[in-house]
Amino acid sequence: MKPASSPYFCACLVFTACCLLATAYCEEPRFERIVIDPNFAGAYQVEVADVNGDKKPDVIAVGGSTCAWYENPAWQKRVVTGPKQTPGIISSATADLDGDGKAEIAIAFEFAMNAPTKGKLVLAVQGRGSDEPWRLIPLADVGSIHRLRWGDVSGDGKLDLVVAPIFGRQARPPRYEIPAQLVAFHTDGDPIASKWGLYPLADRPVIHAIEVRPVGHVRGRWVVLTADNLGVSLIGEDMLTGGVSFTYSTRRLVDGAAGDAPKRGCSEVHLGRLNDGRHFLTTLEPWHGNQVVVYTAEGTNLQKFGTRAVIDETLADGHALWVADVDGDGDDEIFAGHRGKDHRVSIYDFDRARRTWTKTVIDRAIAAQDLRGGDIDGDGTPDVVAVGGSTHNVVWYKPSRR
């Protein structure tokens, strides 16, 4: 693999990106397509986070029973865990828990689609140097473990680990109707040395995705959004502030797609924002579905969302979603991808005059399993990273203004 900084490599990438964007509308941002890794077998999830404490966002990818991180800016690959340690790896969540400048990585593995009692959770802790082996600390067995996210859901100013199984332990195909229990892991002490307590948050059927984030009108705690067979639910909006609490309300925001379980509801969710201050929910529907959907809030909080608007229904096995304002117009753009036939990643840009979303395909050479973002090159503009499962690639899309 040629280094990402070589002139030949960059020239090829720019040419590829221009070809891919030849049909884009003139107001759309262009992207430089930078391949971080062309050979990550079974890539399933990606994150953007500072792993080594140098203030530069790195890229973390999991899949094929491997967790690896790529150091910004040369993108040297370093393996955190391999198949002997984390077979059936499915998710990761990266954060600096103890404030030493170096990140820890929560890792979910031993996932099996039709074995919902299986699943393990560990915390990976770095050695003294970047090339030293990571130490794995077992946290719990969690059946059907599927998604991990960090956030302060307890309100004590420290990060908790939100863990979402996809199914309940007695769920069986083809409907998988036994609800999964969404939980939070919380510790009052040293996050590396102390035990983590488990706190139930909510029960939902077929939880495929979660988003954990602060919102402006909820002080002191983060909320959880679930994409599940009942649509999108908001967990924690009306909590009282002050003190540590795991008492949560659960309110369904939207129903998602109609249909028979499990092909119903929502599969992915992110909360975006428009220039006028309103939030919007974007989802993939139904479970592993074909539609990109937008629901716009009626007002500036998350009390009520408007009509279900399908902005694309051509995905095959939709599995990747992200939002970010990459063109600087104040409206978040939507990024969506799928891993099935005619796999690709596309951007959807909000046209304020027409009140519609304009689609542009930005990459057809990736069977997108996941999308995440962050300001990777420090230029003040969000970047987007995708991983492709059957295409075995980790790709950075760098916006370039004309």
Image (tube, rainbow, N blue to C red):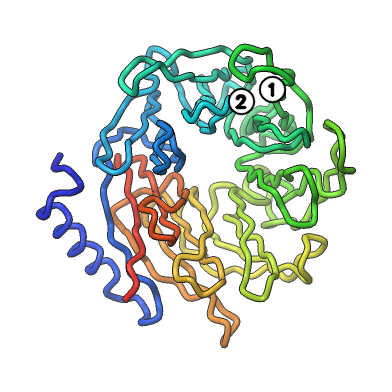
Amino acid residing under circle 1: Arg
Q: Residue at x 61, y 52 (%)?
A: 269
For label 2, the SS is loop
Q: Residue at x 40, y 80 (%)?
A: 27
Left or right, 208 with respect to 360, comes to: right
For label 1, the SS is loop
- Report the residue that reaches farthest toward the bottom: 353
Dot 1: few (<14), some (14–19), or many (≥20) neighbours within 10 Å?
some
Amino acid residing under circle 2: Ser
Residue 44 in the image, given as x and y percentages of width and height: 43, 37
Mark 2 lies on residue? 144
* Quadrant of the frame with the C terminus: bottom left
Mark 1 lies on residue? 169
Answer above or below: position of 88 versus 369: above
**Towards the viewer: 2 or 83:** 2
Task: Look at the numbered discs 1 and 2 and tell me whether their residues touch, using CB distance below 8 Å.
Answer: yes
